[in-house]
Image (spheres, grey):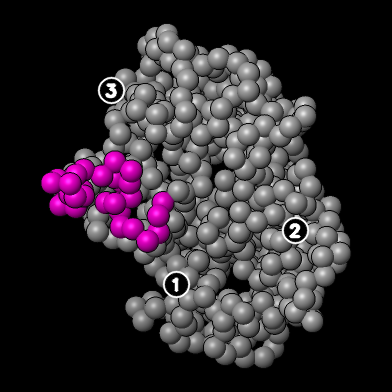
Amino acid sequence: MGKTILKMKDITKYIFDEYGKAIRNSSVKILDQVNFDLQEGEVHVIVGENGAGKSTLMKVLGGIIPADEGTVTLHDEIYTVKGPKEAREKGIAFIHQELNLCLNLDIAHNIFLGREPVKNGLVDHKKIYKKSREYLDSFGYGDIDPRTMIRDLSTARQQVVEIVKAMSYRSKIIIMDEPTASLTKKEIDHLFTLIKQLKSEGISIIYISHRFDELMEIGDRITVLRDGKSITTMSMEHFDYDQIVKLMVGRMIENMFQCNHQVSDEEILKVEGLQISPRTDPMDLTVKKGEIVGLGGLVGSGRSELAKSIFGAHPVYSGRIYYKGKEYTNPSPVQSIETGIAYLSEDRKYDGLITDKVIKENITLASLPQLFKSHIINTKMERQVAAAGIRELNVICRSMDQLVSTLSGGNQQKVLFSKWLTSKPDLLILDEPTRGIDVNAKAEIYQIIDNIAKNGVAVLMISSELPELIGMSDRIYVMRKGSISLEITQKELMTQETILQNTLG
């Protein structure tokens, strides 16, 4: 590591609206005199609960929102920018937690969005594709075609495009907000190789993540935020898991996985001989009332496709699905919701929530026909239902009329849970239910899932986090290459080694 290139001193930000402007007469602070510095060629990790101020602090640095108080010094000069473009021009790139790509454009035009090369007064598309090919190759992604439309990419591949786009600026400071949330182990290893390469070139990384194993591997220093305040900064040599968690939440979190639900003998879901594509082997699966069944495997193993096939959002090529004892034919999302099947997507931004709508509208979104038989929304009832959902799931917000986009990731996830629970499902499919949320919010989500099962709902849960999968599941199915490779029925046999052995090959 080298000299200090960035100093953020006493940064304060009052609660703001969707446009980044402080709400008049508000004394609530999202950031309260936060201090942070960055050295040349280091990876400086920032941790904290959702809502602790991590992303807000980085939005100030990235030019997305202004600080209300405090100073930023970059290369010994006062740093003031009027927007993200100016921040990029000063050498700061931001990879956001929520992907910000144009789905209707291809990879190349996303990489060059807003800075398209021009020839004879027209966009030089040939150069865009040529340079994009060079960028993808130089960062080790030669297998990706720059002409591929973003909407045709998996979430993991979209994340790769975000990373390549940010790195293509050749910035001196790169902010990475949960960059590995949707990546495979192989892609994570490749990203870490790139980070180490960038460090060797003197580029500094600000890295936000809730995955502590990652922090140990690539971090040099760590700063803890809590309730909008900077609590401590220390070398990663002094990292201690329990101490960091206590600093993040102000208390110790014990017994993360408390499962008190009871499994019934009643079968809610039964899958027989199901194929998610013509090239995959048929698979069988069951989920009982009040049972949490885990679905493990690598990204790309077919877990989400299986879940979507049950829900009706992915074609079934062969086999049968039985729901509550009856064959469920030609499923569709609308039919599934009406019959009591809910699917909580891994991508809450695109598939789960309407983030530019308020909380109450999102909570009632999946249950409008049940709540309002006359097809006219009763605003009084809507508010009552939303208030109950906010209260039951402990959504931290100013009011039910707050935009979902202004909530922390953990509270957005609670709103998504509330949306589906309001529809009163008998089968709840969870796809990465704790993706991108902090350790304290995870503990709350685990309690919510346990309570859901305790109320008799059958739960099918996809998770890439093995401790979560093992800690919450009554049984586990492991998937590989689009089919089930193993069923684990005994808790004592649920080990990370056993699951990993059956995900590879």
Say what secondary structure mark 2 lies in: helix
User: Which mark is on residue 483?
Assistant: 1
Q: In the rendered structure, are the residues bearing label 1 and label 2 in contact, judged by CB atoms less than 8 Å apart? A: no
- The stretch of residues the image draws in magenta is 101-129
Regarding residue 323, the answer to whether it shows in the image is yes
Mark in the foreground, 2 or 3: 2
- Distance from Cα at disc 1 to Cα at disc 3: 43 Å
| Location of residue 16 by image quarter | top right
Say what secondary structure mark 3 lies in: loop
From the image, tell me which residue sits under label 3. 201
From the image, tell me which residue sits under label 2. 360
| Location of residue 152 by image quarter | bottom left
User: Which mark is on residue 351?
Assistant: none
Q: Residue at x 36, y 19 (%)?
A: 41
Q: Amino acid at mark 1?
A: Ser
Q: Is residue 407 left or right of residue 214?
A: right
Mark in the foreground, 1 or 2: 2
- Distance from Cα at disc 1 to Cα at disc 2: 39 Å
Q: Earlier in the sequence, mark 2 or mark 3?
A: 3
> Label 2: few (<14), some or many (≥20) within 10 Å?
many
Where is residue 215? Give x, y as percent: 50, 31
